[in-house]
Amino acid sequence: MAEITVTTPLRRSRRIRNQSDDESSVTSTGASDIPMRRRRDRAASSRDKDVNVDLDTIPEVVSAPEELPTAANGKRRSRAVGSENQEDGFDDGPKTTKETRAGASVASDDAQAAKRSDATPPKKPTKSNHQTPVNKNSKRKKRPRSAERPLSSDPGKNARKKLLKKGGDVAEPATTKKFSPMQRKNQREKDAKTDQFIKHVTPPASSSGRNSGRPKIVLDVKVHRLRFLNIHPRSILAMASTPFVKENPTRLAISRKGGTVELVSPDDRWFPVGDCPGVRTREVDALVWVCHPDSSLSDENGSMGKPELNRRADEQSILFGCSRDGTIFEVDFALKRHRNVIGSGGGGAFCMDSLFSHGKRSGSFAVGCEDGSVKIYTPFGPDGRVGKLQLVSSLPSTGNAVLSIAWVPGNGGLADEIGGSVIFAGIADGTIRRFDCSGSAISGSTMSTGSILTQRNSALSYRWRSTLRMTIENRGLRESTKVWALHALTDGTVVSGDSLGHIQFWDGASGTMIQTIDHNDRGADVCCLAISKDENIIFASGIDSSVRCIQRQPLSEGSDPSQQRRWSSSTSHRKHSHDCRALVICHKSMDTCPDRLELVVSGGVDSKLSTYSVHDFKSKRPKVWQNWSNQSPVSLSREKRLLSVMRLNQIDLYRLDSPGMEKTNSSSCSETRDDAKSFVKTISVKSPFNLNCSVISDDGKYLATSDAASLTLFKLKISQVDGTVDVHKIDLDSDCRRPCTALCFERNRLICATSRGPINVVKISEETASLDHTFKEHMSNLAASSHNYAVSTLDVSLDGKWLALGRHSSLKGAVHVFALSTSEQDYKHWWSVPELDSPATCVKFLGNGDVESSLAVSCSSNEFYIYNLERRSLSHWSNDMGIPLRNALPKELKSRSEPVSRIISDPNTPQGLLLGSYGYFCVVKLDQPVPERAKMYPPNHLRAKRLPTRDDDFAISAAPKKKNSHSSSPSSNNFTICLRYNEVVFQDFVGKSEMVVVEEPWSSTLATLPDPLTRRVYGT
């Protein structure tokens, strides 16, 4: 018999078979929100006759998920009828692997009701002889309950009227039941929704031809949905932001558990522009920025452009960190490793501060040590060049560990940047110490404290002296109160946060306490503080996880500006589920305003970043950001169907199911998936450094990984019998073992982007590997300094002719194209892509190998450009769209707050690509017109109800839903944005009709975190 499948948006397929009256059935594999009465009506209308469906009246469809197993020979988790997975990508049940039919087939939103000529007219339900007594005094007359329509078979009053008015027919009610008033009310609401649904999904009648009503499939693939790989983001330990300079970009450094340090650009939608994996056993407990004392970060003459200013700012700013293992080091994002590592000489180092953080050009920073001493270092030598760290001064020991430090600039000039400054130190014995510095020229007299710094052909001597001691109460406890956070204002006020949950204000000149404010009612520790630029607002957080705003009272009219003003706690926000470890003030550029937006950023154990408005803290809700590296830790072998997942010190291999495995009915009972059957092997790398990058070849024969020390290459032998994998290490020459920041395979060649800059091409044989070529042309006229960040993305065309690399840079030449050696050409540098409006985030070659390859480059502003490699210019599509491209893109794409982090080439067509990010992906067809508005799938998703803005640093409530909103919906299926998948770590095609999506649900990350502080909940 013929079988016809009709699919509707947001619903799964419904199958109508030509069967007898006893065998007629309507099966459903989809959501429970499809009205059962409508399914039974169609079954009733098809009894004792054939079903005639006109193909011109089939609505355009949205393919709904169809679950398949993913683990090799493993069990599958299927859903029973009526169950619906969460749309935001969270999984409440056991961890499973799903293969679903991607929600990428999109229907026209302005569709009209389809007519069916073979249905029978409805019969009116017969009234019962029994009548319900009617109250004469009531205003509303009650109808007999027996005359009510049946709940499960009646197509609805409104829908029946409209179909009858248009000449259509509806099915006859099958049964008659009595219902309560509440059931009748619920039924009326469902009928209203049904009428709206019919209008929404049915296309308008067209007489242009038989093919005019056929579905327009945007993307029809089976998706392996992996959510069990446990790629959890790590907790935040410390943060540091570059100080405010009007023309310069802001850089935010984030230290995470495990030794990793990330560099984020707030101006580029918080995109990570660099990272340093670090050492596995070295936790970075504090970070600080310093600047060359002779440099000028501002354009005083107005002769420099924005790229030159950005380059100078990145080149002159240097990031330093310290660890509890007693080391102090420079964080180099170009080499992805620690440089100038020295011992503190005083045990573990817990805190850092610099004069540059307070707006003064200074190359010195102070470190608080475990032995109670404070040491001052500088990386600049007498000639002004960056070199090894030099000890400038050592303050007298306090006898206990220094937990926090605040350095206030003095009145010294460029020749004496330290002289006259004051340092406040929070000690573990519950005291705050003040140290004053006096600088003078070196004489013949001996000095009791301090060391000599030679600078600008003159010698200066710095003498530090402890002048004040402030003691914090301990409320009768045996243990001393710990001062975890300390800040000093320019008016002499000192602000401290301690282990009793107090925020205290001190007079820095006399040492007397001015005021005390409780952060929380549980006495939880205050771990971090942040001060606004005008020093009138203070933010505090800690174990309680709420960020509290404390404001200074404004001056009254005619009052003395120098008088002491009181502080008051105004409001608080709680966006973190666990402890908040770091608070920092940063400034972000805005397109709608020439002034920079001042934000306070918080981070903690739950690994998330939250941004708050400094001056609109109470009125604007905070925004939560999930920052992942622009390099995915997952890579795919399509031929062997293997996934490699990079950890800190190992690589795990997983196997996908073959596409020919038998599928079971989705209405069967759910089964628990066995993770052990998809896991293949773990490859451990013995090194003290964390892994930088890794990649597996497309044929599954080789796997390469690199850390900050060297490159390692493995050969994989996969058994054809049981699928086991044997790993053998391939010996490399010294030229091939150089550490790398990005890797890519091209058949039997390995492309290596070394940390020093050159691109090595390693040719691999069966058991050996040798260096075939080295590209250095892209390094011309570029100094090897930190502003030239490491290469973050590599890609090779399918025909093996082209190689493209991308890096974050403040100057031109961020994207380069090279010609690889083939029978037709030799190795050479082909083209440097011109400077873009915003930093490049990803590069990808388009085409399926049968046509000439073109290069797609995405930017942090969600723009993307297509380049023709033969002409070394923009493609015709990009030229037709215009520059900048943001003016022609749909608003739903260009205004999303998450930048595009991956580009996926569609293997089915050379004109198709996918723009992927952390919480969405967009299907783009270059051979179709670009609509003014993009479709959202699913259209009723929570994140589709509001449109984020370019400066979406604050969460806003959902916009009210407009009536008849479907009438203004877009009619084109191009640029469809799919929101079904969230927390996406990796996404790529396995074949022409298969895709793998790796997600890391927040629920699984939350399960790995320690228990948070128990809070009192209202009503309990």
Image: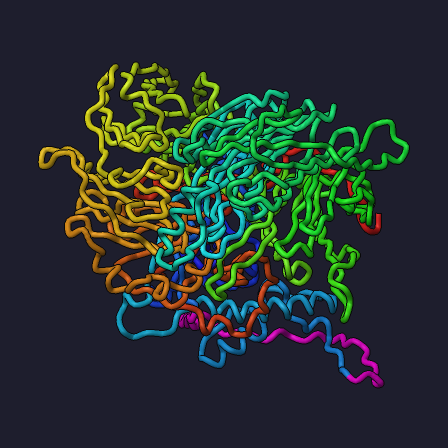
Q: Residue 259: x and y, percent?
A: 53, 29
831 shown above or below 929: above
Residue 762 highlighted magenta (yes or no): no
In the displayed structure image, the side of residue 68 where residue 749 appears, left or right: left
In the displayed structure image, the side of residue 717 where residue 120 appears, left or right: right
Q: Which residues are magenta?
A: 110-139
**What residue is drawn where x is 76% and y is 75%?**
130
Task: List the single residue furthest toward the left.
Answer: 824
Residue 133 highlighted magenta (yes or no): yes
The quarter holding residue 561 reads bottom right
**What residue is drawn where x is 35% and y is 20%?**
712
**What residue is drawn where x is 24% and y is 16%?**
768
Depth check: 288 or 74 in front? Answer: 288
Task: List the single residue furthest toward the front.
Answer: 444
The quarter holding residue 577 reads top right
What number of labels is visible? 0
Depth check: 26 or 44 in front? Answer: 26
Depth check: 965 or 524 in front? Answer: 524
Depth check: 59 or 467 in front? Answer: 467
Question: What's the coloring here?
Answer: rainbow
Task: List the single residue furthest toward the right.
Answer: 476
Q: Residue 25: x and y, percent?
A: 49, 53
Residue 885 at least partly seen: yes
Residue 70 at least partly seen: no
The quarter holding residue 80 reads top right
Classified by dominant secondary structure, the portion drawn in magenta counts as: loop
Q: Residue 850: x and y, percent?
A: 17, 44
